[in-house]
Amino acid sequence: MDVGGTSVRAGVVDGEGLVLDTERAGTPKGEAALEDTITAAVSRLLDRHDATAVGLAVAGFVNSDRRRVRFAPHLAWRDAPVADRISHRLGLPVVLEHDANAAALAEYRFGAARGAHVAVLVAIGTGIGGALLVDGQVFRGAHGVAPELGHLRVVPDGRPCPCGKNGCWERYCSGTALSTTAIELLAKYPGTSSLLAAQVAEDVNAVTGRRVAGAARDGDALAQRAFGELARWLGEGLALVADVYDPEVVVIGGGVSESAPLFLDDAREHYAAIVTGAGHRPLARIRTAQLGDDAGIVGVATMARDLAARTVRNGRGH
């Protein structure tokens, strides 16, 4: 299951990483209602399919044994034993995982990072999610919350971030950042004739990342300039990531990756020019994710399958 702030999506996944069937529901605000929604969605799928375990990909901090949700900004759980609660209700083994980690594992097993020794996932959506895999194993840090790439500070005293800091990477490289940049460019160049200018004249909130992408594809010069800024900041951040992790592959996922033709080549060039030792070291291969919206579900289902296999080998119940 992919448990997000807006929707809960459940899928039955086979051993080849194929999603065979899905259920979707809105995300309730309360803890009990959320767990009711999860168990109801799984139960509907179990009426149609045999399954051995359940995985929950969560947009939040999961502890290192993957049993508790420490904190999820858009969900009701706070230091909650979610895996045990859901397992008790369903009678199946349950594992939790950060959604970016789950997506990275899916891309390693079945997609763009397949076989890579060191792989990093950068999921660019409303913000930035990050994950690091070493020989197919998720690196979680000492407390299960690493790597929080979106909140690397790239601009001291820059744009404010909901995390409480200023100048975080995701404030300059995300769907939200795209709309912010477009609005700033319109203010800097008043009188610009563009589709975006017309939208701002009607309602500043009408300029979303998705609309900036559509305008850029239609040839809007200001929207294309906003994507140029996003490409520059993506390159800046990837250079930082490469300096710290030296990955073999970087996979760019998330909703903004659907617009990769508008920015990824420029980001690659910027990264290659500014990474430490530029011209004298191997560069990471930078690829777009192959599994799209299914990556979180596929990855956490793979983890759940591994958990079920260990449970059987150890002769334990759920």
Image (cartoon, helix red, strand yellow):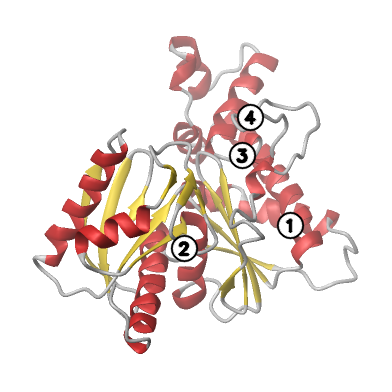
Residue 221: image location, x then y, percent: 60, 31
Q: Residue at label 1?
A: 241
Q: Residue at 50%, 44% (x, y): give it.
A: 125
Q: Residue at 25%, 60% (x, y): give it.
A: 88
Which quadrant is home to the N terminus? bottom left
Q: Residue at label 2?
A: 102
Structural distance between the alpha carbons of marks 4 and 1: 20 Å
Residue type at mark 3 is Phe
Q: Residue at label 4?
A: 161
Secondary structure found at label 3: helix
Using a 10 Å C-alpha cutoff, classify the residue at mark 1 as few (fewer than 14 neighbours), some (14 to 19) or many (20 or more): some
Residue 26: image location, x then y, percent: 25, 40
User: Are circles 1 and 3 on residues that touch, CB within 8 Å?
Assistant: no
Q: Residue at label 3?
A: 227
Please tell me whether mark 3 or mark 4 is closer to you in this view: 4
Question: Which badge, 1 or 3, comes first in the chain's sequence?
Answer: 3
Secondary structure found at label 1: helix
Using a 10 Å C-alpha cutoff, classify the residue at mark 4 as few (fewer than 14 neighbours), some (14 to 19) or many (20 or more): some
Please tell me whether mark 2 or mark 1 is closer to you in this view: 2
Residue type at mark 4 is Cys
Please tell me whether mark 4 or mark 1 is closer to you in this view: 4
User: Are circles 2 and 4 on residues that touch, CB within 8 Å?
Assistant: no
Question: Which badge, 3 or 2, comes first in the chain's sequence?
Answer: 2
User: Is residue 189 something that shows in the picture?
Assistant: no
Q: Residue at 71%, 69% (x, y): give it.
A: 247
Q: Is residue 249 left or right of residue 75?
A: right
Q: Is residue 63 left or right of residue 93?
A: right
Structural distance between the alpha carbons of marks 3 and 2: 28 Å
Depth check: 52 or 183 in front? 52
Judged from this view, the residue extending furthest toward the bottom is 313
